[in-house]
Amino acid sequence: MKTIISIILLLGSVGLFFAYTNPKYQEVKVAKVELAELDKALKQSKDILAKRGQLQQKYNSFKEADRQALESLLPDHVDNIKLILDMNNIAATHNLSLKGIKIDEEKKDTSGNQITSKTPYGSILVSFRVTSSYENFVKFLRDLERSLRIVDVAALSFKATDSGTYDFDVTIKTYWLNK
């Protein structure tokens, strides 16, 4: 009788192990793995916050004029009016006036939705015409090149006039940071 009770208790304990203890043990193992992943993510987020704090402190150490220059160099949005005013101011220093200014906006798909770019920056084309002597136009382009705003001359064509000046058709490409 003692043997039968011992066998029943032994079988009961094996059954209890496989029916209750082992599934709970497997759940605990999975929970430990998840906890380790969460601890790793928490550590990474703390590292990121520390790095963000360092970068914010470094950014705050810049002079306001330097921050504004950086914003002019590569803005975080398109400000067509400011861009045209800046170009007009540069042209005015050479007694030039920009005519027929056209801005090629961002591409849109057939449904009218804006196509999003996967690049960290966006670009826009600005076309205009200016009438000037060659020397004065070169000075204008040099000043445009030296301005803080990043611009590339994408296209340039000219036509001579009877007055000894040229009609220059210029297309420039300028950039901004995508957020």
Image (tube, rainbow, N blue to C red):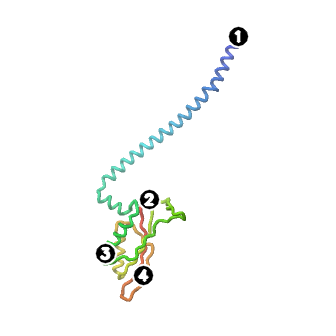
Tell me the number on the disc at residue 178.
2
User: Residue type at mark 4?
Assistant: Phe
* Residue designated by label 4: 158
Tell me the number on the disc at residue 1.
1
Q: Residues within 10 Å of mark 1 (few under 14, many from 20)?
A: few
Dividing the picture into quadrants, the one containing residue 5 is: top right
Answer whether labels 1 and 4 touch (C-beta < 8 Å). no
Instruction: State the SS at label 1.
Output: loop
Instruction: State the separation of the CA atoms marked 1 and 4.
Output: 113 Å
Instruction: State the SS at label 2.
Output: loop
Horizontal side of residue 164 vs 18, given as left or right: left
Q: Nearer the viewer, mark 2 or mark 1?
A: 2
Dividing the picture into quadrants, the one containing residue 133 is: bottom left
User: Residue type at mark 2?
Assistant: Asn
Q: Nearer the viewer, mark 1 or mark 4?
A: 4
Instruction: Identify the residue at the far front of this view.
Output: 111
Vertical relation: 49 (above or below) 153: above
Dividing the picture into quadrants, the one containing residue 152 is: bottom left
* Residue designated by label 3: 92
Instruction: State the SS at label 3.
Output: helix
Instruction: State the separation of the CA atoms marked 1 and 3.
Output: 113 Å
User: Residue type at mark 1?
Assistant: Met
Residue in the picture at 40% in, 68% down: 151
Vertical relation: 71 (above or below) 146: above
User: Residue type at mark 3?
Assistant: Ala
Vertical relation: 59 (above or below) 34: below
Q: Residues within 10 Å of mark 2 (few under 14, many from 20)?
A: some
